[in-house]
Image: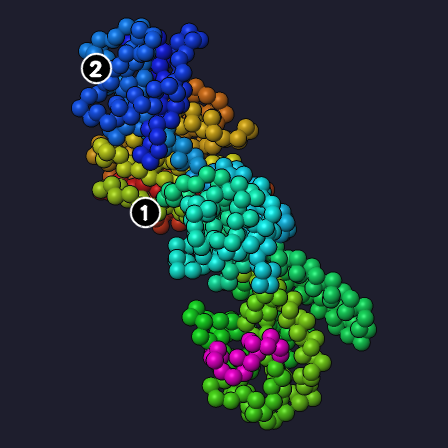
Amino acid sequence: MRLATLATKALGAALWRVEADAAPSFLARHGFNGEAPDHAQGGAEDVRAALADRQRALITRRQEGRGGSVATIPLGEPPVAALQLYFEAEPDEGELALLMPFAARAALALRRSHQVGLIATALRRSQTVIGVVSQAIAQLSLTHTLETAVERIAELTASGHVAVYLREGRRLTAAASRGLEGPHADLAERLLELALGPFRGRGFLFIEDMRSDARLQGLEEGWEANGIRRALVVPLIVHDEVIGALAVYKTRARPYREGEESLLIALSSQLAVAVENARLHERAKELGEVLETTLDSERRAARQLRGLYEISASFSESLSLDATLDAVAKTMVQLFGLDAAVIRMPGARGEVLEMKAIYVRDQGLRETATRLLAVPQPMDAPLARRLLRSGRPVLLRPGVATGQDAHRLLEPFLLRGGTAAVLPLATPGEILGTLTLLSLDPARPLTRETVDVAMTVAAQAALAIDNARLYQQQKDFSETMQRSLLPSALPDVGRVEVGHVYQSAARVDVGGDVYDFLRLDDGRLAVVLGDVTGKGIQAAADMAMAKFSFRALARTHPEPADFLASANEVVVDEIETGKFITMLYVLLDADAGTVASASAGHPAARVVTAEGEVGELGGHGLALGIDSDQEYSVAQTALAPGTTVVLYTDGVLEARRDGELYGEERLDDLLRRRAGLPPQELAEAILADCKSFAGGELSDDCAVVCLRLAP
C-alpha cells in the first residue's frame, strides 16, 4: 500500500482480502493523514464490482459528497486481494494502467506469504502432535496428557470449545474440556455414534450446523448451553477398540473446508496410545500396591514373591519387546523350577497364536521341545476360546486338549506324569497372548497354587510386554518422523553418483542431523548437510525449518554464499534464542566438472581423488541463527572423473573411545584406503569405522553424504 500510494500520489490506500467462498474482508489501510474514510461504506461493493468486470483491470468511481475518486485494482488472477487507491481528483487511467505489473508482483508476494503461513501452521501442528505424545510419555499422567492435548488443540484451532471424551463402561464421559459446561457429554455420545456409522471410513465427523441437523434432535441443551453450532469429531481408537473421542466445537455455522480435520486425525491415534499408556501406568501402580499387600499377608510365599516382584519390576525397565518376551519365558522356568515355557501371541491375520519366545532349561532338549511347543495354536480351538473368553488359566490334564489344539502334542508327557498349564497374558483391558508352562518331572508338578502364583507374575509380565510394545510404537513413530525429514529418493543428475547414510544417537527422540538434495533447473546438483542443536521435538521442528528453507531458497539463491546468507536471515528469525544450525552447502556442476562449497560453522567437505589423495574443500562463516547480515566465503575446485566429495556432520569426528576423538586424521586415513569404493559403500564404511572406534555406541548423530563424478 505504501509503494502504491507513493507511485500514484494517492491520498491513501486500503487492502481487501478476496476468498472464493466468502465476501471481501477489509485488511488494512495506509495514508489519509489521520482522516481515513469508513472503508465499510461502499468499499466491499467496489471490490465485488471490480472482480465481476473481467474486461477492465481498473474500476473508478466518484466518492459521494467528497469530490474525490477511488480506484479498485484486483491483485492476481484469480484475485487473492484487491487494492483501493483514494484520490482528490479523478486519476488518469493510463497512469493507473502502469500499476498492472506491480499488481501482479504484489499478488505473487501475497500468495507466497500465504504459503509460508500454511507451512508454519503445518509445522506447529507437527510440533503439537510430537509435543503432546512426548509429554504424555514423560509424565505418564492421564490427567496431564488430556489437559495438554486440549490446551494445544484449542490454540491451534482457534476454538474456545474443545473436549476429550473417554469411555467408562458403556458411557462416554468428558475427561478434559475447555469452554464447555452442562450435558455436553450426551451430545458427544451421539456425535461419536454418527462418526462410527456409515462414514466411519473417513475417520471423522463434521456437522455444519447442529441446530438444523435432525439427527441431533432432543440434545439441544448440549449445544444451546454452550452457544456452539459447528462440530468436528474424531474417534480415539486403540487396537480397533474405540476408547473415546476428540471434539472441536465452533460458535458459527459454516460448511466443511478440506483439510480442517488433518490436525485432529494426526493427533488422535498418538493421543489414544498415550492415553492407554498413562492408564496402564496408573493400573501398574495399583497392581504394585496390591502385590505389596499380598507380600505382607502371605508369609508362606514371602521369599518367592519378593523375588518375583523384583524380577517383574525389572521387566518394566526393558525397552525391547523381543528381549522382554525372552526374559518372561526364562524367568518363569527359573522361578518355578520348570522345564520349558513358551509365549504365543496373535499372528498378523489374527487367526492363530504364534510362538514369540521360548526357553528350555536343558539345552539338550531344546530342539525337541521347540518342535513341540512352537506349533501355532488356532484361535478357534476349544481350549484357546475358553482361555481367551474367561481370562483364567487352564491346568492341562490328559484329554483336556483335543482336535486341532496345539497342546495335544503334550499328551504323551502328561500320561507319564508331566504337568502343564496355559496362562493368559492379560492387561486389565486386553489379552495379549498365552503363556504355556511345562514340567516333565512328576516330582515337581505344577499345582493349582503354583499356577495362582504364576498368574501374579504373568499379570506383571503382561504390563511389561505392553509397555515394550508401546515403546516400540513410539520408536516407530519417531523413526517415521525422522525418515520424513530425510531424502526419500536419490537425485538423478546424470554422471553424479550419490551415497548417503544416517544414524541417530537418540534411542527414541528424533535426532538433529539433516541433509537433502535438489537438482536445479540448469542441471547442477545442490546438496545441503546440517546439524541442529539438540534432539527431540524442538530439533525436529528446526530440522523441518532447515529442510523447507533449503527447498525454498536453493532455486532462487543457488550460489553457495548467497544461499547461506539468505538461509541465515530465515533461521535468525525462526530459531529459539541460544540455538543455531551448522550447515554445509555444496553445488556440483557435472558438465563443467566443478564443485563449489560454503560453510556456516560446519566441518569442511573432503575431496578424494581416484588415486586416494585427500584434500579439504573450505569455505567459512558463522553458524546460522546467531547473528544477521552474515557473509560466507566460497571454495571452488575442478572435479576430475572418479573424484569423490565427502560431506559429514561433526558426530563422525567426535566419536569417542576413552576420551579420545575419532578426528580428521583417522577419517583422512580411511578415505585414502577406501577411495576406490562406490559412494554408497564409502559412506557406509565411514559410519561403520567411527562406530567401531566408539565401541558400537554413538554419542552424537552421524550423517555422511558422498558425491562422485563418474568417469
Q: What percent of the width, then of the height, locates residue 443?
A: 69, 88
Identify which residue, 476 or 257, lies in the foreground. 257
Measure how far apart labels 1 and 2 are at the Cα level: 47 Å
Residue 438 visible here: yes
| Residue that carries the numbered disc 1 in the rendered image | 489
Q: Give the range drawn in magenta.
A: 376-393
Whether pointer 1 and pointer 2 mark residues with C-beta atoms closer than 8 Å, the reply is no
Q: What percent of the width, then of the height, locates residue 461?
A: 62, 67
Residue 593 visible here: no
| Residue that carries the numbered disc 2 in the rendered image | 97
Could you tell whether 94 is left or right of 484 in the image? left
Quarter of image, res 96: top left
Q: What percent of the width, then of the height, locates residue 53?
A: 21, 25
> Which quadrant of the rendered structure holds the N terminus?
top left
Extreme residue in the bottom direction: 415
Q: What percent of the width, then of the height, locates residue 701?
A: 49, 43
Identify which residue, 6 or 551, lies in the foreground. 6
Q: Is residue 378 magenta?
A: yes
Identify which residue, 336 or 655, lies in the foreground. 336
Circle 1 SS class = loop
Amino acid type of disc 2? Ala
